[in-house]
Amino acid sequence: MSVLITNIGELTTQDTEGTVLRGAAVVLEGERISWIGPAAHAPAADEAYDAGRRAALPGWVDSHTHLVFAGDRTAEFEARMAGQEYAAGGIAVTVGATRAAGDYDLTRLLLARVAEAAAGGTTYLETKTGYGLDVGHEARSARIATGVVDEVTYLGAHLVPEGQDADAYTDLVAGPMLDAVLPHVRWADVFCERGAFTADQARHVLGACAAAGLGLRVHGNQLGPGDGVLLAVEVGAASVDHANHLADADVAALADTWSGFADGAAPGTVATCLPACDLSTRQPFPPARRLLDAGVQLALASNCNPGTSYTSSMGFCVATAVLQMGLTVHEAVRAATFGGALALRRHTGEDADGRRAVGSLAVGHRADLQLLDAPSATHLAYRPGMPLVHAVWKAGRRVR
Ligand SMILES: [Zn+2]
């Protein structure tokens, strides 16, 4: 089954050159892209779809969310907006509600959130555990997420549960809890921050997870200067997420991991910016301009979670990155597509799992794309907050 999407006003491919084509067409063959080029030269297909001069771009790759949860934290949000300072402890409220929810309800809630994300143009989605915080509940969250989202990350080291010894809990996360989640996850993440886990505790967890074959990511430098970025570089993490408070040494260390990338070296540590979270916690934005200028690859992600960023709108994140963080539209869109794919190591070819590249449009890549009700991607920031997503294909299948 092939579909020809023709009469595309502006096609942003986010391939290596970041090409923008006018008057373009794309052919989807099964789950993959089989042809891209000028509409006038497009081959025949089983079905044709007229894009009506709309802009097309890759579906969003949201590389950082926390969607497996129950409960509500409206009161905490209201208190924060009334001037109360954000601290990491609110997670415990969600842990209580998540543990109390049955499998059916937890799955239903997750599916509804994934559907919301897809309606907003997200075609590749990572989510984390981290609201279970004991062996059984972490394993359950991982099991429920597998098969619903594209990538699952183990975040047993989200917070030390109240009343528990931090080192003893860290041993649990690096031991029996890891064994229990392992069949369901590809990544491990640690919240390395004051009020959460120290660098030594985080190193212990990440070391055990790497030895078990998981890829690594780190929540770091969100609430103040800290060890998260340097730890992420030290352990070869695929991304360090938040990265709001950076010293020169942090930026230099991240840039160093990308020094050979353009010449074909393996990717380094992506700096994943989470601007919706920064707005919701009234934190300063990460120095995205400084990172890009230093040669660091950026991702933009929603960090959708009930405490600090209850939105999965990647369009909103792109608009914020442009309007508030000093990125161009092209840079922000690239970070929300190719950058997210880099952070999940899905930016290139088929890997051992037989998965196709996402986050850019090229022959052989997964057919994940969105059409905007706009003539160009610039409208994402020019018309912030507007419902611009017109149509979405995920793995060649129309999902909106
Ligand atoms: Zn997070």
Image: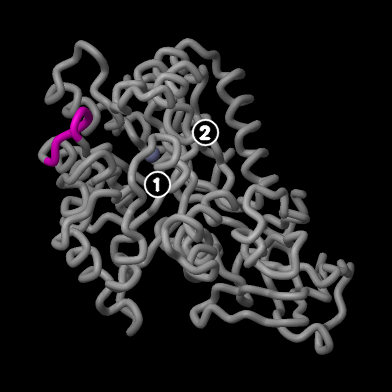
- Residue extent of the magenta highlight: 194-199
Q: Residue at x 29, y 61 (%)?
A: 269
**Amino acid type, residue under disc 2 in the picture:** Tyr
Residue 194 spot, x, y in % from top left: 18, 33
- Residue at mark 1: C-beta within 8 A of ligand 1: no
Which quadrant of the view contains residue 371? bottom right
Q: Decide: is 153 above or below 134.
A: below
Residue 259 spot, x, y in % from top left: 25, 77
Q: Is residue 372 magenta?
A: no
Q: Is residue 75 left or right of residue 395?
A: left
Secondary structure mostly seen in the magenta stretch: loop
User: Which quadrant does the N terminus fall into?
Assistant: bottom right
Total count of labels: 2
Residue 150 spot, x, y in % from top left: 54, 47
Ligand 1 appears in which quadrant? top left
Regarding residue 351, the answer to whether it shows in the image is: no
For label 1, the residue is 186
Q: Residue at x 22, y 39 (%)?
A: 192
User: 199 or 178: nearer the eye?
Assistant: 199
Q: Residue at x 28, y 42 (%)?
A: 222
Q: Residue at x 54, y 76 (%)?
A: 15
Residue 310 numbered mark, or none: 2
Residue 64 spot, x, y in % from top left: 44, 45
Q: Is residue 355 left or right of residue 384?
A: left
Crowd band around label 2 with a 10 angstrom C-alpha radius: few (<14), some (14–19), many (20+) = some
Q: Residue furthest front?
A: 82
**SS at mark 1?**
loop
